Amino acid sequence: MPELRNCQRCGRPYPYAGSEYCRDCLREIDRQYDLVREYLRNEPDVGIEELSARTGVDAALILRFLREGRLVHAKSGLTCERCGAAIPSGRFCAACAEELRAALSGAKDATRFYGAPRYLDDRRRDGGP
Ligand SMILES: [Zn+2]
Ligand SMILES: [Zn+2]
């Protein structure tokens, strides 16, 4: 029996299979992702607010795509979690990502790099409707 969870987007219970969203919402999120990606291809200079207004996709979801590295956008408004530099996608700037890679491949303790776990905060911040 799969575990039942409540979808983080629509709140309906669904059989958990590794995603925090139900199947319907995953499909909808993919559709919105395609919309945003298409729009960015034609209008690479658009800001997040306008991008959200034009595509009808929630700004929080767009930021999530960017954080996850699914989208890359020069005006993402994201900053490196370690040094605060502006970044187009993901969580770290190139320099910090490189240091992180080195730290992970070396003997150093990766949790020192990350500091306290942040995923709980992240979840609260862009946590669904
Ligand atoms: Zn759902
Ligand atoms: Zn950095």
Image (cartoon, rainbow, N blue to C red):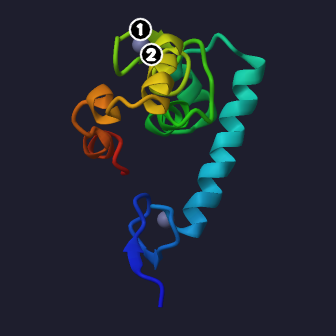
Which of these two is toward me, 36 or 19? Answer: 19
Q: Is mark 1 on a helix, strand or loop?
A: loop
Q: What residue type is labelled 2?
A: Cys
* Mark in the foreground, 1 or 2: 2
- State left or right for residue 99 relative to residue 42: left
Mark 2 C-beta closer than 8 Å to ligand 2: yes
Q: Which residue is drawn at 57% across and 37% down?
A: 56
- State left or right for residue 16 relative to residue 119: right
Mark 1 C-beta closer than 8 Å to ligand 2: yes
Which of these two is toward me, 43 or 105? Answer: 105
Q: Is mark 2 on a helix, strand or loop?
A: helix
Q: Residue at x 32, y 40 (%)?
A: 122
Q: In which quarter of the image is residue 12?
A: bottom left
The 10 Å Cα crowd at callout 2, few under 14, some 14 to 19, many 20 or more, is some
Q: Do the residues labelled 1 and 2 touch (CB within 8 Å)?
A: yes
Identify the disc placed on residue 45.
none
Q: Position of residue 95 (x, y in %)?
A: 49, 11
Where's ligand 2: which quadrant?
A: top left
In the depicted structure, whether residue 86 falls above or below residue 59:
above
The 10 Å Cα crowd at callout 1, few under 14, some 14 to 19, many 20 or more, is some
Q: Mark 2 — residue?
A: 96
Q: Number of numbered discs present?
A: 2
Q: Position of residue 99 (x, y in %)?
A: 45, 18
Q: In which quarter of the image is residue 9?
A: bottom left
Q: Which amino acid does label 1 sit on?
A: Ala
Q: Mark 1 — residue?
A: 85
How many angstroms separate mark 1 from mark 2 (CA)? 10 Å
Q: Residue at x 37, y 51 (%)?
A: 128
Q: Quadrant of residue 60?
A: top left
Q: Where is residue 93 in the image (x, y as percent from the top left)?
A: 48, 15
